[in-house]
Image: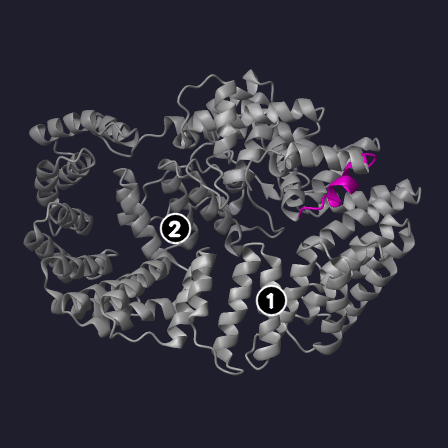
């Protein structure tokens, strides 16, 4: 607890520092304008800035004021005033002139003043060749030429972008080039350009747009030739975007040829499309065609393996087991052989043929020791032995897993469950010793569980020797690597951030990272700050995660700075969380942990299943909760409102807490997998050992979600040990120095 008490004044200091943070500028009126800009109150900000233009204080750079005014007027969509002030900011002596020029050009382009736009873009390219906007300017010039009907010029400019290895515009420029060929009525050249996009990557949005254009051209110009190979790639675009029925129709248009590789691919992915639509009998029919008619197509073993998965999905494990045995016997050389062997063991285990399962798993560890499934096989062997009370054998298996796969997530689990084995063997002293080892290793999830178990066994955890920030959290305050992070910014980045041009600062920093300019720790740190200031918290988290992996951010014990660790476990929207946690009698840290694992505090995040916002609420669930909250005219977009989303999510968590008697693990699992399913599992298996219950959760996503949320909840409680610590996560210190879904059941 001594170490915990040290944290309190530290976090209070950081919070106060962030709240008192002011721009490093001498003029109070400019300071106030910048505060208003950060609050997106651009109209009153312009009044202050216009006053500064009139008075021209000698301590201020007039170009900065005009640049800032241009930015405010642009946000207000007052294009004439914005253009006027941006142009007045242009000067060879002003450090941010290229940014003013680029925005000025964009305003002219937005207003369809194409000549002026091109002139300013060209000036940027010629006078500021090192600007991170050079390639943007070249692309925009090509776009303007395309819009003006200068198709030959657009092709010339887009070709330059395509050929430049430093450009990120390959795909967009190729698409633009195809449009220019269409403008010249060169239909075949346009088709080939669109096709190059599909051939290079058939999974992104540009590929989908390119395919739409190809289909339009082919319909309008029947003489254009679509080859068999191209039809397959077109089908793959549709398949990768979930349009399975349309994909099947295209694959069927591939003219079949005897034992042809291309036909085999088309038939195989027809099967995969049926498979993805859960039409398993139709999928099996297509896979069997591959085996019978196209065995030389490179899709033979894939089809055989996928067939076994279909039988498992059809709940015909005996057929799946039989086919897996044949596959393992006859295709041991296949890239799918190790996975098939693991699947065989899994099917046998689920059918309670434990001896057969152990045999299959052991065969995998011996025959494919380097397989990515080898560690899983060791884990399953040890778990089966544990469940059958063969604790000595389980200990040996877990020891092998830890020795052969150090650092592996399952090795961490094996470490914890070795202690459980000794506990079950009625050897508490040995069990406690191993739990303490787990506690000191900073294992994800299992270290926190080890502490809980030790406390239940009557141990005093405070005596555990560990880095200053205890147990699971391998982070330290007063970290030597933290002293200089953020204070070595480039002059341009510092000025952009000082003037609150965070979008432009992000462009500058990401460009510096790509070109490896400046101090990378500071670059990533500055990106975190920019995204936090823009309240794009999930993106701030991503860069904090990347920064935390840098060897240059770790001390001799592998610990990272406490301040950086706090960025990985933030408390954004703190007032809202506390408000509704109090209303629904929830621990705000448990709510914060749920938000972190659901969305990384991304208010606009939408999952693949359609769950929306901070707490990933499904629209139909939101509609029901809105009815309970007596909210009128509920619409899906309301779920992107942090206050609405957090209230709904917290209310639902309280409902689950009541249903599952305040058991955080069960509540977390029910939040992800549905309360009906969780109730059924509890009824079937009981809760004699919560850890064992969690490991036996059948759905991998739900099991992982339970562990992730419980682990984050544990860390939050370490980082914010008292109510006074629970304040809005402080934004990073500023220095402008140069240098799955919420589902019900």
Label ID, residue 527: none
Q: Image height check: is 734 above or below 389?
A: above
- Please identify the quarter of the rendering in which residue 225 is found: bottom left
Q: Earlier in the sequence, mark 2 or mark 1?
A: 1
Quarter of the image where the N terminus is located: top right
Camera-nearest residue between 233 and 117: 233
Q: Residue shown at 26%/74% (left/top)?
A: 224
Label 2 vs label 1, nearer the camera: 1
Distance, label 2 to label 1, CA atoms, is 54 Å
In this view, the residue farthest toward the right is: 426
**Residue under numbered circle 2:** 523
Camera-nearest residue between 301 and 655: 301
Label ID, residue 285: 1
Q: Secondary structure at mark 2?
A: helix
Q: Please state the horizontal and vertical placement of residue 176, each as a whole percent of the image.
A: 23, 63
- Left or right of residue 260, residue 638 in this image: left
Q: Is residue 196 magenta?
A: no
- Left or right of residue 323, residue 526 in this image: left
Q: Please state the horizontal and vertical placement of residue 727, each as a whole percent of the image.
A: 50, 25
Camera-nearest residue between 509 and 308: 308
Q: Is residue 405 visible to the viewer in this orientation of the structure?
A: no
Q: Which residues are magenta?
A: 686-699
Q: Please state the horizontal and vertical placement of residue 457, each as a whole percent of the image.
A: 84, 33
- Please identify the quarter of the rendering in which residue 201 is found: bottom left
């Amino acid at each position: 607890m001594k170490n915990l008490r040290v944290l309190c004044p530290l976090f209070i200091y950081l919070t106060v520092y962030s709240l008192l943070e002011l721009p490093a500028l001498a003029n109070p009126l400019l300071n106030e304008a910048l505060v208003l800009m950060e609050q997106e109150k651009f109209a009153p900000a312009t009044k202050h800035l216009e006053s500064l233009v009139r008075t021209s204080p000698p301590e201020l750079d007039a170009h900065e004021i005009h640049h800032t005014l241009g930015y405010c007027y642009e946000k207000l969509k007052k294009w004439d005033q914005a253009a006027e002030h941006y142009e007045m900011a242009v000067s060879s002596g002003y450090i941010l002139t290229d940014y003013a020029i680029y925005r000025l050009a964009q305003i002219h382009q937005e207003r369809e003043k194409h000549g002026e736009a091109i002139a300013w873009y060209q000036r940027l390219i010629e006078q500021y060749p090192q600007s991170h906007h050079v390639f943007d300017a070249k692309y925009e010039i090509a776009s303007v030429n395309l819009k003006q009907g200068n198709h030959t010029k657009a092709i010339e400019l887009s070709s330059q972008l395509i050929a430049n290895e430093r450009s990120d515009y390959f795909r967009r420029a190729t698409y633009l080039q195809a449009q220019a060929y269409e403008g010249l009525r060169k239909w075949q050249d346009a088709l080939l350009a669109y096709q190059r996009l599909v051939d290079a990557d058939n999974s992104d949005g540009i590929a989908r747009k390119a395919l739409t254009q190809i289909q339009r051209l082919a319909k309008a110009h029947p003489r254009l030739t679509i080859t068999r190979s191209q039809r397959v790639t077109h089908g793959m675009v549709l398949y990768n975007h979930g349009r399975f029925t349309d994909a099947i129709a295209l694959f069927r248009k591939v003219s079949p040829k005897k034992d042809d590789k291309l036909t085999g691919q088309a038939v195989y992915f027809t099967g995969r499309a049926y498979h993805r639509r859960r039409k398993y009998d139709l999928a099996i029919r297509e896979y069997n065609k591959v085996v019978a008619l196209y065995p030389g197509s490179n899709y033979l073993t894939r089809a055989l393996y996928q067939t076994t998965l279909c039988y498992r999905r059809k709940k015909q494990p005996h057929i799946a087991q039989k086919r897996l045995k044949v596959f393992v016997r006859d295709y041991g050389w296949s890239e799918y052989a190790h996975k098939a062997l693991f699947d065989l063991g899994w099917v046998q285990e689920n059918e309670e043929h434990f001896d057969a399962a152990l045999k299959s798993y052991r065969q995998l560890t011996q025959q494919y020791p380097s397989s990515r499934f080898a560690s899983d096989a060791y884990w399953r062997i040890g778990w089966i032995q544990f469940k059958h009370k063969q604790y000595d054998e389980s200990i040996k298996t877990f020891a092998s897993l830890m020795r052969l796969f150090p650092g592996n997530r399952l090795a961490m689990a094996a470490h914890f469950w070795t202690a459980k084995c000794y506990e079950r063997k009625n050897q508490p002293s040995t069990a406690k010793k191993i739990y303490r080892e787990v506690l000191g290793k900073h294992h994800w999830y299992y270290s926190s569980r080890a502490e809980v178990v030790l406390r239940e066994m009557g141990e005093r955890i405070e005596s555990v020797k560990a880095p200053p920030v205890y147990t699971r959290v391998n982070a330290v305050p007063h970290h030597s690597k933290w002293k200089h992070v953020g204070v070595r910014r480039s002059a341009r980045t510092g000025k952009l951030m000082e003037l609150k041009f965070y979008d432009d600062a992000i462009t500058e920093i990401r460009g510096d990272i790509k070109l490896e300019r400046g101090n990378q720790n500071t670059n990533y740190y500055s990106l975190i700050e920019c995204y936090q200031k823009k309240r794009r918290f999930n993106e701030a988290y991503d860069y904090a995660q990347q920064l935390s992996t840098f060897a240059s951010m770790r001390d001799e014990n592998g610990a990272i700075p406490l301040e950086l660790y706090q960025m990985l476990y933030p408390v954004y929207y703190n007032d809202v969380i506390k408000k509704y946690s109090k209303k629904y009698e929830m621990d705000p840290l448990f709510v914060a942990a749920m938000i972190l694992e659901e969305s990384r505090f991304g208010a606009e995040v939408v999952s693949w299943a359609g769950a929306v916002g901070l707490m990933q609420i499904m629209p139909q669930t939101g509609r029901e909760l809105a009815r309970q909250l007596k909210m009128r005219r509920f619409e899906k977009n309301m779920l992107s409102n942090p206050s609405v989303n957090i209230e709904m999510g917290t209310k639902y968590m309280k409902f689950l807490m009541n249903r599952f008697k305040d058991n955080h693990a069960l509540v977390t699992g029910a939040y992800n997998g549905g309360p009906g399913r969780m109730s059924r599992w509890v009824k079937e298996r009981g809760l004699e050992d919560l850890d064992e219950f969690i490991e036996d959760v059948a759905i991998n996503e739900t099991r992982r979600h339970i562990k992730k949320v419980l682990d984050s909840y544990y860390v939050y409680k370490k980082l914010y040990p008292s109510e006074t610590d629970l304040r809005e996560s402080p934004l990073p210190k500023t220095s402008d120095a140069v240098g799955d879904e919420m589902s019900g059941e």
